[in-house]
Amino acid sequence: IKGSIGQVVQTVKTDTFTTTSTSLTALTGLTANITPTASNSKILVSVNLGAVDASGNIITLFQLLRGTTVIGSGDASGSKSRVMFKRIVPSSNDAAAQSAQFLDSPSSTSQLTYSIKCKTSEGTLYINKSSDEGDSAAYGRTISTITLMEVLA
């Protein structure tokens, strides 16, 4: 039925991720695969990062890819990074969830792989945890997810 959901795939990342890369690098463990049933199907990509934190006043950037193709990003502008979303972390130990969605039109019935790349302007980027935490119930560990839904045409 047109507009109905054909299939749903989700990857859940329960461990933490840390990077000091100032170049876009793979957010490991947060990749999902789907094989559309029809070439005119669309894929709704939903990304939820349970906690994003960094070591200080730092810009964190996140890019969505289908295979090696960047999708869901802003227009090219000088040397700016083309990304799906960003977060400016005003101070360390300021973890906050980040979510984004994109409706992709891949025109394919082959297996598709969706993934996230990320980088930091400086310092350290943390996913699923705070930048500075003690062994206390006051500090939580979160999950991050990438969910793919095939929307039938």
Image: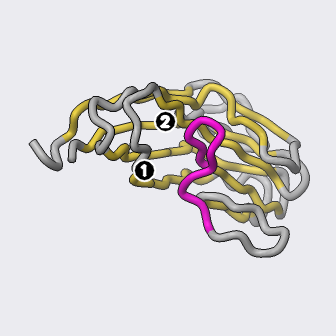
- SS state under label 1: strand
Quadrant in the rendering for residue 9: top left
Residue at position x 22%, y 34% from top? Answer: 6
**x and y percent of residue 122 in the render?**
90, 55
Residue at position x 76%, y 66% from top? Answer: 90
Frontmost residue, 109 versus 71:
109
Residue at position x 29%, y 44% from top? Answer: 40
Q: Is residue 103 above or below residue 142?
A: below
Residue at position x 72%, y 35% from top? Answer: 26
The residue singled out by tag 2 in the image is 145
**x and y percent of residue 71 in the render?**
56, 52
Q: Is residue 88 above or below residue 139?
A: below
The residue singled out by tag 1 in the image is 104
- SS state under label 2: strand
Q: Callout 2: few (<14), some (14-19), or many (20+) C-alpha neighbours within 10 Å?
A: many
**x and y percent of residue 23 in the render?**
85, 48
Q: Amino acid at mark 1?
A: Asp
The CA span between labels 1 and 2 is 17 Å
Frontmost residue, 6 versus 29:
6
Marks 1 and 2, the one that precedes in the sequence: 1
> The magenta stretch spans which residues?
64-74
Q: Is residue 37 above or below residue 86?
A: above
Q: Amino acid at mark 2?
A: Thr
Judge left or right: residue 133 versus residue 8: right
Picture quarter with the N terminus: top left
**x and y percent of residue 38 in the render?**
28, 35
Q: Nearer the viewer, mark 1 or mark 2?
A: 1
Spot the residue most to the left: 1
Frontmost residue, 146 versus 2:
2
Judge left or right: residue 115 versus residue 88: left
